[in-house]
Image (tube, coloured by chain):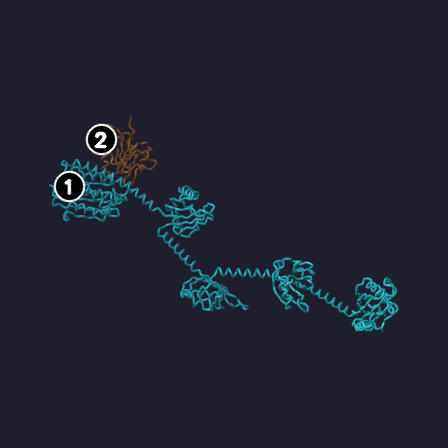
């Protein structure tokens, strides 16, 4: 049933590791999601939104040169649901983001799909 | 002349009467003894009488007839002598001449009315002499009363055994009262006036009264509360003599003397108590003679050149200089120096001497004292040793110390404490406020509460707080201290020590980050391995091939990490990296050519480049130049793109055309064409030409970390 779990969901992935980003994209697409963008760096959110709505974001915390806390805040500000997918423990989150959903790496893909399905702003 | 019963006896009496040296006559009353106005008749008169009055024998003559004025003058006296039957002495002036007679009237039994024997003595000169003496006495008395000293004349009173027990005042002058406090003494005994008078007073006076030798002495009468200076001398012809006593109450002088002596005694005691040696020196302070105190130098006797004899060789020059300076300035000598005693013991002395100036203003001598301060010096040395050790230990251990006098507010910091607060040692005077001013604002409330708590409970003060130094540095300090309390339980002092825990805290933080990072990296690595494994899968139908490829790729990743751990600069030299990959794939030096400037790759880039070279080399062995007679040129250069440094790395194979069979989009090709742009924001080309494979990796040079390096 996973192929329908995320059907129609417009999702972006922010992950600096090519292989993992590629993996996630593949899995989420298999679950029916439409992956709008995969990026190793913090993407331009406004540019992405210009092309259409975003239902959810799956973001790594550490992008090598930068972290995604500000991006997460931007998502919060625009009420776009997101989940962190990270090798860190949830304890590393700053106070204002500590309520964010956090998935620990290496993650079972079913777990990722389930979480995204829960948080995603589903189109009616 | 009446009858005498015995003629012989009569003649004897007449002869005796006539021979009396005193003028004498015998008279009988005429006409009755009671008749006051009666006349008297001379019965007899002796030659002395006749001579005195310049008359012939008067026997049988009437007194009134012969001497009418005398009869009138004397009749009553004769009658009184007769009627009283007792002798009378009457002194009368001669009515005719300036003479004075002393007449002794003795009644005699004679006839019916009796008779009177009158012995007449001319006392005119005696009287005159007495008058003169009285005048002299008055003058003496005046003199005695005029002198300031007390004077008295006493009779010493002896008991039955001849022991002097008391004395009676015969005379006393006016000053007597003020010197003794005894009022109206004349005729009274000393014991009557002062019952508790000490026995030594009558004893001394008794000795003089008996011995007749004047004495001068000072003595106290505690009964009278006075001190007397006394000169007592005998008066009279023989023992027991009367005593004249000239004396003075010297109580006040004595009290002053006593006070002076007391104060001298105290001074002496003080000197004895505080110093060990008291000495005199000659004007040039070379010859020293001990005049008191302890035998400190082992040679208190003769004057010695003390600097030569006792002062330690190494201290001699300093002592001589100090003495010379004192002499030229006429200032006291005040030095601490070492001496070697006559017994060879080494001692520290504190020597002080003051110059005594003569009338000419020159130094006449030196007077001084020296105290043995060996023990004090040792204690001081130990203390200074201890203080030095503490200081060195606190400097080496970087421990800051403080001592806060809570009552006076005085605060003492060790040098390190100053530095911890961002001050040069001694730069400011530390106070509680100075200290509090540099407390980190967020730590102030907690810190002050902890101090108050320790002060209240007496427990240990334990606190870790931040200090803001003026240069912007924030230091973490860990303090440990304790209050000391006074007798009333009030906090009087606070002592404590501080260590700087900034570095430890930084390391702890670093370690925490490192653990988190390692965890992150390991999880990432596992994720990556999983992805690599999955991506490797489609290109191989055969499991052992798949495993070989997978292991090869994982080993390449492992090599990057080894290189990274070897190079402390956290960057990897590109040339070295390529050579190692080729070596691993057993490429011979004649099969390839490397050319490019030295390039330091970031760990992240190194990881990708390693894997790319690995894939290219593996493919080349299988399909290309390395598996045949081909040749590989690997060249790189740096270039500038939009103001950022880029690297351009090119892998160009020259191989027989038949061998080239590598057009699938396999793991290596995707790595170059997709991962390089994705992760390194660069460009990747993988092309198969007739001559062989051409791969090109262009990416910006940055210093992003590896999976085991901490990315910020």
* Relative side of B624 to A77, left or right: left
In terms of depth relative to the viewer, which is nearer, B546 or B210? B210
Alpha carbons under labels 1 and 2: distance apart: 36 Å
- Which callout, 1 or 2, points to the residue nearer the camera? 2
| Residue B302 x/y as whole percent | 47, 69
Residue neighbourhood size for the residue with mark 1, other residues' Cα within 10 Å, grouped as few (<14), some (14–19), many (≥20): some
The hue used for chain A is: brown
State whether residue B454 is above or below residue A49.
below
Residue under circle 2? A30
Say whether marks 1 and 2 touch (CB < 8 Å): no
* Relative side of B311 to B72, left or right: left
**Is residue B171 shown to the viewer in this render?**
no
Image quarter of residue B442:
top left
| Residue B338 x/y as whole percent | 42, 63
Chain hosting mark 1? B
- Which label is found at residue B689? 1
Circles 1 and 2 on the same subunit: no
State whether residue A33 is above or below residue B572.
above
Q: Residue at x 23, y 35 (%)?
A: A22
């Amino acid at each position: 049933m996973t192929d329908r779990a995320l059907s129609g969901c417009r999702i972006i992935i922010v992950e600096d590791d090519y292989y993992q980003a590629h993996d996630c994209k593949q899995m989420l697409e298999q679950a029916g999601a439409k992956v709008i963008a995969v990026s190793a760096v913090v993407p331009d959110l406004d540019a992405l939104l210009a092309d259409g709505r975003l239902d959810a974001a799956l973001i790594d915390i550490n992008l090598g040169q930068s972290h995604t806390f500000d991006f997460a805040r931007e998502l919060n500000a625009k009420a776009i649901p997101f989940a962190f997918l990270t090798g860190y423990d949830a304890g590393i989150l700053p106070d204002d983001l500590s309520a964010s959903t956090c998935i620990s790496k290496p993650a079972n893909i079913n777990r990722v799909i389930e979480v995204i399905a829960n948080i995603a702003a589903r189109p009616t | 002349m009446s009858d005498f019963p015995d003629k012989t006896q009569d003649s004897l009496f007449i002869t005796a009467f006539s021979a009396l040296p005193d003028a004498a006559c015998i008279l009988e009353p005429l006409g009755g003894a009671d008749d006051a106005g009666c006349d008297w008749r001379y019965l007899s008169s002796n030659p002395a009488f006749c001579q005195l009055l310049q008359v012939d024998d008067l026997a049988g003559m009437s007194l009134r007839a012969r001497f009418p004025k005398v009869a009138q003058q004397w009749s009553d006296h004769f009658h009184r002598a007769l009627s009283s039957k007792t002798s009378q002495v009457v002194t009368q002036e001669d009515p005719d001449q300036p003479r004075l007679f002393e007449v002794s009237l003795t009644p005699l039994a004679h006839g019916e009315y009796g008779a009177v024997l009158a012995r007449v003595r001319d006392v005119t000169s005696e009287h005159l002499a007495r008058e003169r003496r009285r005048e002299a006495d008055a003058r003496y008395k005046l003199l005695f009363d005029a002198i300031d000293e007390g004077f008295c004349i006493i009779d010493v009173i002896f008991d039955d055994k001849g022991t002097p027990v008391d004395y009676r005042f015969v005379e006393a002058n006016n000053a007597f009262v003020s010197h003794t406090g005894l009022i109206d003494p004349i005729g009274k005994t000393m014991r009557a006036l002062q019952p508790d008078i000490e026995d030594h007073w009558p004893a001394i006076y008794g000795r003089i009264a008996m011995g007749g030798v004047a004495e001068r002495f000072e003595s106290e009468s505690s009964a009278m509360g006075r001190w007397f200076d006394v000169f007592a001398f005998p008066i009279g012809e023989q023992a027991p003599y009367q005593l004249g006593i000239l004396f003075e109450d010297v109580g006040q002088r004595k009290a002053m003397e006593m006070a002076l002596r007391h104060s001298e005694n105290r001074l002496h005691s003080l000197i004895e108590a505080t110093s060990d040696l008291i000495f005199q020196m000659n004007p040039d302070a070379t010859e020293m003679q001990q005049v008191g105190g302890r035998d400190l130098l082992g040679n208190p006797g003769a004057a010695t050149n003390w600097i030569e004899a006792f002062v330690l060789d190494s201290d001699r020059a300093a002592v001589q200089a100090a003495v010379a300076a004192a002499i030229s300035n006429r200032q006291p000598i005040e030095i601490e120096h070492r001496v070697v005693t006559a017994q060879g013991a080494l001692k520290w002395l504190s020597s002080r001497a003051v110059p005594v100036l003569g009338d000419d203003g020159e130094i006449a001598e030196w007077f001084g004292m020296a105290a043995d301060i060996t023990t004090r010096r040792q204690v001081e040395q130990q203390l200074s040793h201890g203080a030095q050790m503490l200081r060195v230990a606190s400097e080496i251990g970087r421990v800051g110390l403080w001592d806060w006098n809570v009552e006076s507010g005085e605060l003492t910091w060790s040098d390190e404490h100053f530095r911890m607060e961002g001050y040069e040692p001694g730069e400011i005077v530390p106070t509680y406020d100075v200290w509090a001013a540099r407390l980190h604002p967020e730590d102030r409330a907690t810190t002050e509460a902890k101090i108050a708590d320790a002060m209240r409970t007496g427990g240990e003060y334990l606190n870790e707080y931040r200090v803001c130094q003026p240069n912007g540095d924030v230091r973490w300090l860990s303090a440990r201290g304790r209050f000391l309390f006074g007798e009333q339980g009030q906090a009087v002092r606070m002592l404590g020590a501080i260590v700087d825990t900034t570095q430890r805290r930084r390391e702890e933080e670093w370690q925490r980050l490192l653990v988190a990072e390692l965890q992150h990296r390991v999880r990432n690595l596992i994720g990556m391995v999983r992805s690599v494994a999955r991506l490797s899968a489609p290109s191989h139908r055969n499991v052992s091939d798949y495993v070989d490829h997978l292991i090869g790729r994982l080993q390449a990743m492992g090599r990057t990490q080894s290189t990274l751990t070897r190079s402390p600069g956290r960057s990897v030299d590109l040339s070295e990296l390529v050579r190692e990959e080729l070596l691993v794939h057993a490429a011979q030096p004649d099969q390839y050519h490397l050319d490019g400037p030295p390039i330091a790759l970031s760990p992240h880039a190194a990881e990708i480049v390693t894997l790319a070279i690995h894939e290219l080399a593996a493919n080349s062995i299988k399909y290309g130049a390395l598996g045949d007679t081909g040749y590989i040129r690997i060249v790189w250069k740096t270039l500038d793109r939009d103001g950022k440094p880029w690297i351009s790395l090119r892998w160009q194979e020259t191989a027989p055309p038949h061998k080239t069979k590598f057009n699938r989009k396999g793991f290596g090709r995707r790595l170059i064409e997709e991962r390089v742009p994705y992760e390194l924001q660069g460009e990747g080309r993988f092309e198969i030409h007739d001559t062989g494979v051409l791969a090109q990796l262009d990416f910006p040079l940055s210093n992003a970390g590896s999976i085991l390096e901490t990315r910020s």
